[in-house]
Image (cartoon, rainbow, N blue to C red):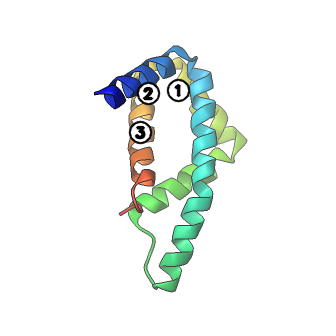
Amino acid sequence: RGAAAAAAAARLRARRRSPSDRFSEMLLRVEGWSEELDARHAAAAEAAAAPSRIERVLRGSIVGGRNEEVVAALRLCYTDYKPLRLMGDLIFSLMGKLMRKSGPS
């Protein structure tokens, strides 16, 4: 019960940050996933396995996060349009869960 309350409190604090700050934090987290995906890719290459669909989506997110024009457009959508922000939060949450697992499937 204590862990659930702490998680709920963390979500509430996250909602109080500005959308722009939350977007910036997401970009940093996605960039951090790059090294982990590189390690997974190397292991998959040794096993002659093709990257999974979700891994390709994550890699595309990383590449997009390095393009200033893409970042500016996504930041505008995320900060100015609440329905898109909600969807962005959902997608980011799902990607985070996948990264916490042993590997994307």
Q: Which residue is mark 1?
A: 78
Q: What's under tag 2, amino acid-wise?
A: Leu
Between 64 and 2, the one lying in front of the other is 2
Q: Mark 2 = which residue?
A: 84
Residue 27 visible in the current orientation: yes
Three-letter amino acid code of the residue under disc 3: Ser
Assess disc 1: are there few (<14), some (14-19) or many (≥20) residues with their C-alpha within 10 Å of its C-alpha: many
Label 2 crowd bin: few (<14), some (14–19), many (20+), radius 10 Å: some
Which type of secondary structure does the marked residue at label 1 adopt? helix
Q: Residue 49: where, in percent of width, then height?
A: 43, 80
Q: Residues within 10 Å of mark 3 (few under 14, many from 20)?
A: few
Of badges 3 and 1, nearer the viewer stands 3
Q: How far apart are labels 3 and 1 at the CA level?
A: 15 Å
For the N terminus, the quadrant is top left
Q: Secondary structure at mark 3?
A: helix
Q: SS class of the residue under badge 2? A: helix
Residue 39 in the image, given as x and y percentages of width and height: 57, 69
Q: CA distance from mark 2 to mark 3?
A: 14 Å
Quadrant, the C terminus? bottom left
Position above or below: 51 against 24: below
Q: Nearer the viewer, residue 60 or 98?
A: 98
Residue 100 image offset from top left, x and y in percent? 43, 52
Tell me the residue that label 3 is attached to: 93
Q: CA distance from mark 2 to mark 1?
A: 6 Å
